[in-house]
Image (tube, rainbow, N blue to C red):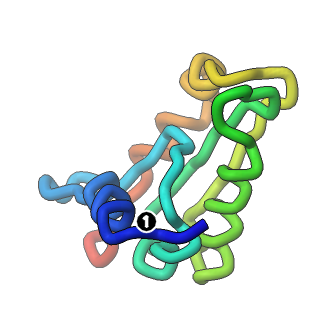
Amino acid sequence: MQASVSDLTVAENAFDDEEGVFDFAAHAGFLVFEVAAPRFRDVAVWAFHGRRDPEIDAEDSRRIVRALEEAGSTKVKYTEYPLEAHQCYELAWRETDLFPWMFAQAKAGQG
């Protein structure tokens, strides 16, 4: 996959937290992390994906997570639901650790 300037802008804006509360992603998306991962290695990410997703291959989320890990991230988690399709967010919101994990995150240099 090749990244364009507009793809990188989307990736940067997706994780821009101007309020300084926390950097968080609770939904696995289709961003160009192979290129942008080093810049986001300090951003806390918990990615969720349904293995049976007919719209976005679960391998895309695995690549995002792998790219972040290879860039040195220690704040990345990945949950893949083997029997779910694209609507796996319904299960993600039910993860008992999601909100405690989310609110335990701090913006780099602020906690």
Q: Is residue 41 visible in this depiction of the protein?
A: no
Badge 1 amino acid: Val
Residue hosting label 1: 43
> Which percent across, then down, holds residue 57?
72, 41
Where on the picture, by quarter, is residue 12?
A: bottom left
- Mark 1 surroundings within 10 Å by alpha-carbon count, few (fewer than 14), some (14 through 19), many (20 or more): many
> Which percent across, then down, holds residue 52?
80, 27
Q: Nearer the viewer, residue 38 or 95?
A: 38
Where on the picture, by quarter, is residue 54?
A: top right
> Which percent across, then down, holds residue 5?
32, 70
Q: Secondary structure at mark 1?
A: loop
Q: Nearer the viewer, residue 90 or 63?
A: 63
Q: Does residue 102 appear to the left or right of 90 in the view shown? A: left
Q: Name the image quarter holding the N terminus.
A: bottom right
Q: Nearer the viewer, residue 86 or 88?
A: 86
Q: Does residue 47 appear to the left or right of 22 in the view shown? A: right
Residue under the point 43% across and 71% down:
40
> Which percent across, then down, holds residue 2?
54, 70
Residue under the point 39% across and 45% down:
103
Residue under the point 45% across and 47% down:
25
Q: Relative to residue 105, is residue 70 depicted above or below? A: below
Counting every numbered tag in the picture gives: 1
Q: Is residue 98 visible in this depiction of the protein?
A: yes
Q: Name the image quarter holding the C terminus.
A: bottom left
Residue under the point 32% across and 52% down:
14
Q: Does residue 32 appear to the left or right of 85 in the view shown? A: left
Residue most toward the right?
82
Q: Relative to residue 102, is residue 53 depicted above or below? A: above
Q: Does residue 43 appear to the left or right of 53 in the view shown? A: left
